[in-house]
């Protein structure tokens, strides 16, 4: 009977999902501190993202992306990729746009990865071509409802800007593995 109870406890522990705590920024890393503030802003201002934080395998957070456009334009931002409670790498976002557009905008962006396969695909840094439209005025912006597409969901939060657009764009995400400290260092 004792053996059966022990086996049952071990099986229950093996199949139970460990509780996932919140990621905490390294206070000595400015990008991580800005990322932590951006995550708090998303959770407070874009409440529909809460389920993505709870269900995502991993996510990339860009605390500040700047876009400028007048006929032709572009955007750039740096961020971090978090898997579980660990920063696994650095990421960059660059975009070029062409179409009807005028203005400048600064926003935060999160890219949620539904599963490990979506994260691994992100790490390959391929250029994606898309069409987009939007409007930003001050801290208000119009954006679509997030939904997973090929295992990835993107959400933006306008920080400030005056921009209108109807464009075709190419976007590229780059990823670089984090250098982990060796044990005892």
Image (cartoon, rainbow, N blue to C red):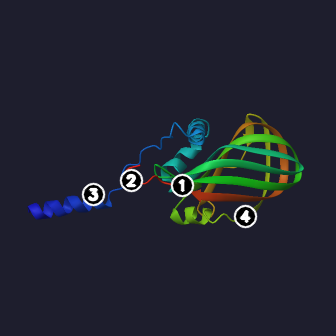
Tag 1 residue: 178
Q: Which residue is mark 3?
A: 13
Q: Is 113 situated above or below 33?
A: below
Secondary structure of residue under mark 3: helix
Report the residue marked by disc 4. 127
**Residue 110, label in figure:** none
The number of numbered badges drawn on the structure is 4
Question: Are discs 2 and 4 less than 8 Å apart at CB?
Answer: no
Q: Earlier in the sequence, mark 3 or mark 4?
A: 3
Gap in angstroms between the C-alphas marked 3 and 4:
42 Å
Where residue 4 appears, x then y in whole percent? Answer: 13, 64
Q: CA distance from mark 3 to mark 2?
A: 28 Å
Q: Quadrant of the N terminus?
A: bottom left
Q: Residue at x 74, y 54 (%)?
A: 94
The first of marks 1 and 4 along the sequence is 4
Residue picked out by circle 2: 183
Which one is closest to the eye, mark 1 or mark 2? Answer: 2
């Amino acid at each position: 009977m004792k053996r059966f109870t022990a086996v049952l406890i071990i099986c229950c522990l093996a199949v139970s999902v460990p509780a996932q705590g919140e990621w905490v920024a390294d206070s000595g890393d400015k990008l991580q501190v800005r990322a932590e503030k951006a995550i708090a802003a998303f959770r407070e201002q874009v409440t529909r993202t809460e389920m993505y934080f709870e269900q995502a395998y991993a996510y990339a957070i860009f605390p500040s992306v700047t876009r400028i456009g007048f006929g032709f334009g572009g955007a750039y931002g740096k961020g971090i990729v978090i898997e579980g409670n660990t920063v696994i790498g650095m990421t960059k976002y660059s975009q070029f746009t062409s179409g009807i557009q005028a203005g400048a905008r600064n926003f935060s962006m999160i890219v949620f990865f539904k599963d490990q396969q979506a994260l691994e695909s992100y790490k390959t840094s391929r250029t994606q071509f898309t069409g987009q439209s939007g409007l930003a005025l001050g801290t208000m912006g119009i954006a679509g409802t997030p939904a997973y597409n090929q295992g990835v969901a993107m959400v933006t939060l306008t920080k400030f800007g005056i921009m209108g657009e109807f464009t075709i764009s190419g976007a590229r995400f780059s990823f670089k593995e984090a250098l982990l400290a060796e044990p005892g260092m």
